[in-house]
Image (cartoon, rainbow, N blue to C red):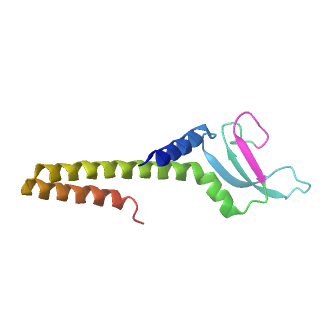
């Protein structure tokens, strides 16, 4: 991983850590509209919003005519970003392990050691690839 990539991952990680802690939710609720049956999609996060739409201690709320598909993505973004960061870190470590293992076999010059290293490299790569298969 080069410096630009590492810096971008650090930036993403810091933004995620700075965001309002979960849970993030989306639901339909009455937001004090002009009609008694007027419901709006609401995305909320933080202690101050869960359970009441009138408190403003911590967190945030987005209210309006939000497409449910967009609300779903927004409310799950922290979970998805965390998962993807963990996946990138796991695969980056697997690539480092592959590099180390391949280097062992190449520089030993021993045919048996090289074959063992190749098998280890393939196993490490296979484990890393399993994480991305859907």
**Left or right, residue 70 beside residue 38:** left
The image quarter in which residue 115 lies: bottom left
Q: Hey, which residue is sitting farthest top in the picture?
A: 57
Residue 42 x, y percent position in the rendering: 74, 52
Magenta stretch: includes residue 20: no
**Left or right, residue 131 beside residue 46:** left
Residue 37 x, y percent position in the rendering: 85, 59
Q: Residue at x 57, y 48 (%)?
A: 78
Q: Give the prevailing secondary structure in the magenta stretch.
A: loop
> On screen, 128 above or below 24?
below
Magenta stretch: includes residue 62: yes
Q: Residue at x 42, y 66 (%)?
A: 134
Q: Residue at x 57, y 43 (%)?
A: 16
Q: Hey, which residue is sitting farthest bottom in the picture?
A: 134
> On screen, 96 above or below 133?
above
* Region rendered in magenta: 53-63
Residue 5 x, y percent position in the rendering: 48, 49
- 61, 55: nearer the viewer: 61
Q: Residue at x 69, y 46 (%)?
A: 44
- 44, 30: nearer the viewer: 44
- 100, 13: nearer the viewer: 100
**Left or right, residue 65 beside residue 127:** right
The image quarter in which residue 68 lies: bottom right
Residue 55 x, y percent position in the rendering: 77, 37
User: Total label count?
Assistant: 0
């Amino acid at each position: 991983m080069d410096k630009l990539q590492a810096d971008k991952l650090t930036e993403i990680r810091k933004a995620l850590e700075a965001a309002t802690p979960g849970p993030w939710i989306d639901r339909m609720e009455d937001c004090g509209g002009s009609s008694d049956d007027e419901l709006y999609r609401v995305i909320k996060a933080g202690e101050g919003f869960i359970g009441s739409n009138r408190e403003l201690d911590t967190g945030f709320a987005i209210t309006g005519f939000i497409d449910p598909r967009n609300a779903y993505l927004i409310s799950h973004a922290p979970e998805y970003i965390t998962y993807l960061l963990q996946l990138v870190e796991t695969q980056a470590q697997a690539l480092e392990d592959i590099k180390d293992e391949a280097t062992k076999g190449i520089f030993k010059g021993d045919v048996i050691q090289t074959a063992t290293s190749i098998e280890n490299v393939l196993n490490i790569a296979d484990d890393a690839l399993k994480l991305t298969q859907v």
